[in-house]
Amino acid sequence: MTPADWISMALLAAGGAFCVVGAVGMLRMPDFYTRMHAASVIETLGAGLVIAGLMVQAGFTLASAKLAILAALIFFASPTATHALAKAAHERGVEPVLGEGGGEGGK
């Protein structure tokens, strides 16, 4: 195996791990806002690492250029969409689940 294969394998494995952690977070989190955060981790970090691994595997080709465009689209669109969803939920009156005692805003 070449060094590029090892790097690609590490990036793909890390991206897959972030996707799994984000998916578990989507299932385990208590409210809309924290679930949305888990989804943004999947989109931005998980997909970004997978795309980076695919770019290393593809080398300097047209496929890598297309993957770079896809990565840029995800990098800019995902935070914007997440912010828009959070703002819309806040304006509709969706309240976050607050923890017991101690913390900022805790009851």
Image (cartoon, grey):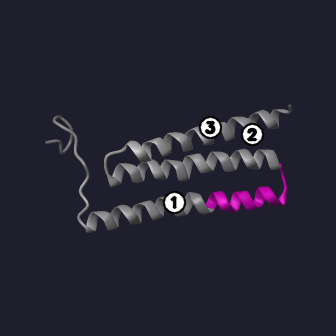
Q: Quadrant of the C terminus?
A: top left
Alpha carbon distance from label 3 to label 1: 19 Å
Mark 2: which amino acid? Answer: Ser
Mark 1: which amino acid? Answer: Ser
Left or right relative to 9: residue 94: left
Q: Identify the disc placed on residue 14.
A: 3
Q: Identify the disc placed on residue 22.
A: none
User: Given contact means CB atoms under 8 Å apart, are the residues at marks 3 and 2 in contact?
Assistant: no
Alpha carbon distance from label 3 to label 2: 10 Å
Residue 2: which quarter of the image? Answer: top right
Q: Where is residue 80 shown, x and y percent of the image?
A: 47, 63
Q: Secondary structure at mark 3?
A: helix
Left or right relative to 31: residue 23: right
Q: Secondary structure at mark 2?
A: helix
Q: Is 10 placed above or below 96 here?
A: above
Residue beneath disc 1 = 78
Of 91 and 25, nearer the camera is 25
Alpha carbon distance from label 2 to label 1: 24 Å
Most frequent secondary structure within the magenta stretch: helix
Residue beneath disc 2 = 8
Q: Which residue is found at the position 66% from the left and 47% from the top?
A: 50
